[in-house]
Image: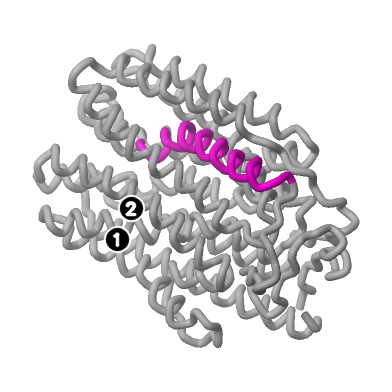
Amino acid sequence: MSEPPRSFEKSDQVESGIPSRDPSSDGGHKETATQKPFYPAGATKAWLTVFGCFCIQFSTVASVNSFGVFEDFYVTEFLPSSSASRISWVIGLEIFLQLGLGVVGGRLSDMGYTRAVLATGSIIYLVSFFMLSLAKEDQYYQVILAQGVGMGIGVGLCYVPALVTAALHFPGRQAIAMGIVICSGSFGGGIFSIMINQLIQKHGFASAVRAAAYLALGLLAIGNFLITVPPRPPKAATGETNLLYIPYVLTLVSGLLGQLGGLFPLFYIQLFADSHHLARGFVFYCVAAMSFSTAFGRVIPSYFADKYGSIGTYIVCGFTNGTYNLPNSNFSTLICFFLAGCAFIMFGAKSPGGLIVFCIFYGFFFGSTTSLFTPVITALMPSEADRGKLVGVAMAPVALASLFGSPIGGRVVGGNYDWWKGIVWTGVLLAAAASIQIIARHIHRKNKHNAGY
């Protein structure tokens, strides 16, 4: 059995001013009546940084979360010679780079280059966004180079540094800070979806993309200006990190399976609804509703994660389990099963009422699991100095799943659109991901007990 990664001792925590954690928790932070929240760079700079990182994620991740609009437009009009499965490689590549480059962005952030890497990523993203507006009809290579490769690199360089920078301002209770930053991509996806969809109909593809790029330009400028990089604790104080720690490795496997199955409804729901002849305007706003409910799902559970523990709340949002003796066990037992269960609501999304119910519920619980994945990593591996590296490595398997998930989903349903196959594919993988995370949590708690934590 591998040993649990050690964080720095309580004496070090007191000297550094960082609130200590309840050793019986799984990553949540419980403040006593006499403790005050600790902000390494001050409360004002901490919350301005959260807002700045929110703007950065809002602008960049929005292109990923609004891809349902692009997918539908590419399939039906802009890229008529390309199949839905082939077009899905565009978003698969963009998400792969978004998460896969987390190792690079996170490591550079740990080395003290946070501002430089965020500025570089922002510039690459904006240039590529404007280049997408110059793409010609039925020129697949232009779209995949601009949107898949260029915008993917830009998002990838910004994603992990923005998360880690916000989290470092809130030692011991980082879930809510990360949840606020992550939810911005869903809000951005909803707003960009509405904006691009309306502008394409009125002014064409090129003008719609340029308008979205100008909005991103303004928000990225604000975001980069507002962030403050807090002082990091000395590496010696945080103890060693073990990337082969079994619960950490199992969590990476869980994240891979969850992403592999979970992306299918997000990127195919609009095509699913179109194939069932639902009103196009209604379908579009249902997709936007999914983005907004995903945003709320990324904030609300983060509040409970800081109170009761990230790991338990994460399991809750993916699968039901009642065997853990925690104050929030009933909450955990209820919510986690819902995500796998919500996938099967898609069977009833053939009607307007079923579609709106599915979009709201699935969006909320999928958003919950994606936002809590990073706090779970930091709960299992509490090193502050290496946080960028730990989060970046954790994003690598999720990136691989993102690259192949959407195209595989297209293959699963096939050219005849056998949607039941995709729904079962999603539900089974999400259930498997949650089950693996339950095992990881059990091993982690056992290791902590054996080590005397």
Q: Residues within 10 Å of mark 2 (few under 14, many from 20)?
A: many
Q: Position of residue 14 (x, y in %)?
A: 83, 65
Name of the residue lying farthest toward the right: 236
The residue that appears at 79% across and 74% down in the rendered structure is 3
Give, as a single range, the part of the protein colored magenta: 41-66
Measured in 3D between alpha carbons, the distance from the residue under mark 1 to the one under mark 2, in whole angstroms, is 8 Å
Estimate how packed mark 1 is, as few (under 14), some (14 to 19) or many (20 or more) residues with alpha carbons within 10 Å.
many
Q: Is residue 298 above or below residue 200?
A: below
Residue 205: image x %, image y %?
28, 19
Q: Are marks 1 and 2 in contact (CB under 8 Å)?
A: yes
Q: Which mark is residue 361?
A: 1
Question: To which quarter of the image does residue 45 belong?
Answer: top right
Q: Does dot 1 land on a helix, a strand or a loop?
A: helix
| Residue 67 appears in the figure | yes
Give SS at disc 2.
helix
Where 218 sits versus 244, above or below? Answer: above
